[in-house]
Amino acid sequence: MLAKTFHFIWGTIVRPKATFDELAQLTSIKSAVMLVILVQILAWLNLLIFTASGFDWLGTRRGLSDPTYVGFFGYLPVKVENYVPIFFIVVMPILALLGLVVIPGLAHSLSKLWRGQGTFEQMVNTLAYAQVPSLIVQTFFNDMILAGVPANLIAGHPYAFTAAMNGEFGPAWSTIFWIYMIGVYIIGVFVWVVVLGAIAIHRLQKIPWWAAAVIMFFSYFLWFYVIGGSVVR
């Protein structure tokens, strides 16, 4: 199953149309669930690497007040020492499960306005993998490398990513990191996911391209900025 997951991840990057067609033929959502599990494992592995290396994940002891917040736009206060375990053990799995159904559910429902022909299960499988850019860029490349222990060790700083953005390594590095954060981490990944999602919706629901793009944009925006944005990190 894990080998098949990596097969679909690679396929989503290099040949998305054929991969989405292949995913649409699956009779269960096991592959989508496996992708979610993989993301969770990488997140927990990242925390383990931070802990084993003696670094503080996301600089929480330094950067968060006490009490701090983990959800609902600042309406769920917790003690700062409880923030990391609550976020990783409770909040992240909940968001992962919501993400598995919210975007596909919205996309499937809205597609019916144009008499979409796909099934909910097809939407779950394909739109889960349409979010592979987020896995690659945000979860792996950013959180585990640029904002992870490797960058901290190279820079000799307990939280190199934030230090660079705050100008502690000079204005040039600050500019580079801010351009990356806005242009790649936020806008680039968002556009990439929307394009992939639009391809999947168009092919499976048999609706116009523009409608598929609008549906995916709305669904992912609602998830990423409204639901996901309610969590304070």
Image (cartoon, helix red, strand yellow):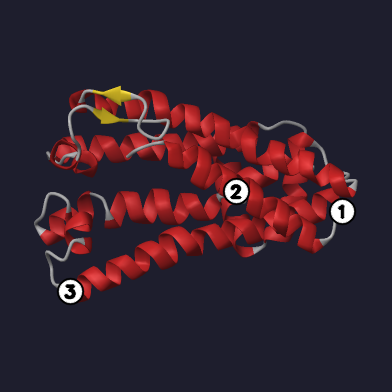
Q: Is residue 184 visible?
A: yes
Residue 117, placed above or below residue 231: below
Q: Earlier in the sequence, mark 3 or mark 2?
A: 3
Question: What label sits on residue 206 in the rendered view?
Answer: 1
Asked if disc 3 and disc 2 are in contact, CB closer than 8 Å, the reply is no
| Residue located at (67% from left, 62% from top) | 15
Foreground of the two, 91 or 12:
91
Residue 140, placed above or below residue 56: below
What is the distance, in whole Å, between disc 3 and disc 1 at their CAs?
Answer: 49 Å
SS type, badge 2: helix
Question: What label sits on residue 220 in the rendered view?
Answer: 2
Question: What label sits on residue 41 in the rendered view?
Answer: none
Residue 183, placed above or below residue 203: below
Q: Position of residue 189 (x, y in %)?
A: 50, 59
| Residue located at (64% from left, 31% from top) | 30
Question: What label sits on residue 171 in the rendered view?
Answer: 3
Mark closer to the observer (3, 1) = 3
Q: Position of residue 123 (x, y in %)?
A: 73, 41
Foreground of the two, 82 or 9:
82
Label 3 is placed on what type of residue? Pro
